[in-house]
Amino acid sequence: MNRRTLFGASAAAAAAGVLLPRPAAAFVPSGRPVLTHGVQSGEANGGSAYVWTRADRAGRMYVDVSDRPDFKHARRLRGPVVTAEGDFTGKLRLTGLRPGERTYYRVQVDGDHLSAPLTGSFGFPDRHKPIRFVWTGDINGQGWGINPDLGGMRIFEAMRRLRPDFYLCSGDTVYSDGVITESVTLPDGRVWRNVVTPAKSKVAETLDEYRGQFAYNLLDANMRRFLAEVPQLNQWDDHEVTNNWYPGEILDDARYTEKRVDVLAARARQAFFEWQPLEPGKVYRKYSYGPLLDVFKLDMRTYKDANDANTYADPRRGLLGPDQRAWLIRSLLESRATWKVIAIDLPLGLVVPDGPTAQEGVAQGDPGAPLGRELEFAAVLRAAHRAGVTGIVFLTADVHYTAAHHYDPARAAVQDFTPFWEFVSGPANAGAFGPNALDGTFGPRAAFVHAPPAANTSPLDGFQHFGEVEINPWSRDFTVRLRDLTGAVLWSTTLEAPRR
């Protein structure tokens, strides 16, 4: 990073009201510790939640918890020691929280002195009020980063204003393979300006470079404010590591000195769990929100098979792996919730190519009987159908536009499943693409599509999206609203609750 770029980044960051990460220093900072990237909460479910922060040095994390915003009668919890080994990030699981009430938290780190506090809050869905949550994905991709001229990533402020119970990030939480430059000149002469950092000046390969991808996102004041008020559920997709990756892959990309994807993925995974308020371990999990909603968050990367033509007949292959596939089927059959949201980081019925001959996603464009990765989803849908499971809805992002797809066996090459919907939304702050072709195997029909006129359309032209779900506690109906970056509703539908 040259002198002019560094000073330009500092000026842009100041205009956006954010702080750039400090360069590595050869001395121990003096004075009070500083919490560098805000506070976040996540996995607020079942009376517990994780709270996260990052300091500029080693110290003990403390969290004050209260049901009052003035923190009167707060209880102080002793958290972990944040150290250089974890990039000075820390998280603490709060337990014994009361569903239906808002929890306020205040975080400090004690080194030689106590840091200034940062505060946040989160709530749990109240069974006497609608459940409301938002989802999107694809953040800071294709070279479109935090633009101070626009006030940063305004889509997160639009989501915050809806006061959702939680936020589902459907993958591509960062673009580790995407370089952010000072400016991008559009074909019509307009200039997009970016906040820039050293970690975003090249593709990520080292652990510190992967950490820098998450640090970059949190330079945005809108995102920090949103995450301090809304607990999150996070998936990962490909760009957390590199484009269209799968285990065992060896890269043919001159930008990388480390070609082994397994090495890169291990570093990215560590950064993913360090920098987000998530329970360490598996990415895939189930979250229960009372009798109305269960969310099944899938991991379609860790166990993925190689990208090929995706026309094989081997039922042991796929995106989920045998353990996750069996867990999903078992969990769906055990669920008693009215609605079962399956959060997938790759769409079910859209063809997502990886070059001219290989396929990245589930579908491959053959409208006939299930082939390749379609086999394992056919097995999941068949098991749910035969067990009488209803209320399945798929939510996803990945393809950088928003759409609503209805799947019906009456239109499909396979009939052994119950009709369902898939809703797509994104990107949050990235190039806009699409629409992709639909594969006819499961009988999808596009009820709505909002896609740009050209590939990699700049966020200056809109086509940035998020989705909102609202579940009525009395009728149990499931309403979906597909919104643009301002929060305006582009399309909506209400799904009637399945009969008991």
Image: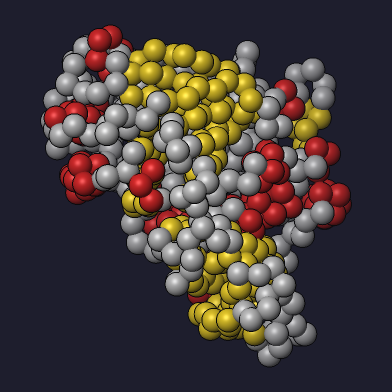
Q: Nearer the viewer, residue 66 or 64?
A: 66
Where, by quadrant of the figure, is residue 89 drawn? Answer: bottom right
The x and y percentages for residue 408 are 29, 16
Q: Nearer the viewer, residue 298 or 177?
A: 298
Q: In the image, 408: left or right of 186?
A: left
Q: In the image, 29: left or right of 404?
A: right
| Image quadrant where one finds the C terminus | top left
Seen at 45% across and 71% down, the residue is 95
Q: In the image, 307: left or right of 346?
A: left
Please, which residue is most extreme toward the top here? 411
Seen at 51% across and 15% down, the residue is 448
The x and y percentages for residue 102 are 58, 61
Q: How many marks?
A: 0
Where, by quadrant of the figure, is residue 47 drawn? Answer: bottom left
> Is 140 located above or below residue 215 in the figure?
above
The x and y percentages for residue 474 are 45, 38
Seen at 55% across and 61% down, the residue is 101
Q: Is residue 45 visible?
A: yes
The x and y percentages for residue 352 are 40, 24
Q: Nearer the viewer, residue 255 or 235?
A: 235
Q: Nearer the viewer, residue 463 or 360?
A: 463
> Is 169 located above or below residue 29 in the figure?
above
Seen at 61% across and 36% down, the residue is 428
Q: Is residue 182 visible?
A: no
